[in-house]
Image: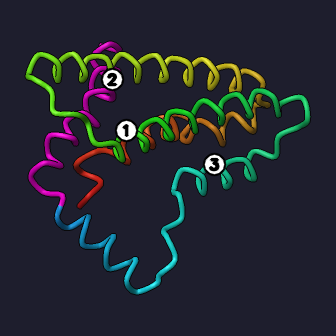
Amino acid sequence: MKRRRWLALIALPLVGNAFAQFGGRRRREGGDAQKKSGEEPRVNQIEATLHEFHEDLKLTDAQAPAWESYVAKLRALASDLARESRSRPPQLGLLQRIDRVVDAARNRLTALEDIAQSAKALYAGLTPEQQKMADPRLANLIAMPLAARSPLSAN
């Protein structure tokens, strides 16, 4: 069951790439309109959530290294996903595209396992009060970079 959940988390952004081929118009129009109007770019939701979470936890100096490790791994995944979404893949044959999708899923799984390990270490070092605050948020933060690429997030 756990494996299915991980697979679903990994596959969701990949499905987004398929949907992007059909319905990316609205997203592009919003980006162009935003540039033309001179509006400020949207706040990075992951960074804002991390900042709020950090403030709420009120970490001690001893807890800071575990937090930094967790945040660094989460940011690395978000950065990789953003870089991947900006890059234009070369024209590949079907088998090469399949291999590319599988490699991306494998890389995401490895990144998620690293984040989960850091999250567990962070959680173990928290006080019971901090753990109560962290319970609903740690897992949600792990999923945020993946959800940002979801086809559902464009709606």
Q: Which colour scheme is used?
A: rainbow
Give left or right: position of 33 versus 40. left
Q: Mark 2 points at which residue?
A: 104
Foreground pick, 35 / 110: 35
Give left or right: position of 39 versus 137. left
Q: In this view, which residue lies farthest toward the right?
A: 61
Residue at 32 percent of width and 13 percent of height: 3
**Considering only vertical position in the picture, is 52 above or below 10?**
below
Between the residue at mark 3 and the residue at mark 1, the CA separation in whole angstroms equals: 22 Å
User: Disc 3 residue type?
Assistant: Leu
Dot 3: what SS? helix
Dot 1: what SS? helix
Q: Pick the quarter of the image with the C terminus.
A: bottom left
Give left or right: position of 102 versus 49. left
Q: Name the residue under label 3.
A: 50
In this rendering, the label closer to the viewer, 2 or 3: 2
Foreground pick, 46 / 136: 46
Q: Main secondary structure of the magenta part?
A: helix
> Residue 13: which quarter of the image?
top left
Q: Mark 1 points at which residue?
A: 84
**Considering only vertical position in the picture, is 56 above or below 125?**
below
Q: In this view, which residue lies farthest toward the front?
A: 90
N-term-proximal mark, 3 vs 1 = 3
Instruction: Answer whether labels 2 and 3 touch (C-beta < 8 Å).
Output: no
Give left or right: position of 2 versus 48. left
User: Disc 1 residue type?
Assistant: Glu
Instruction: Answer whether labels 2 and 1 touch (C-beta < 8 Å).
Output: yes
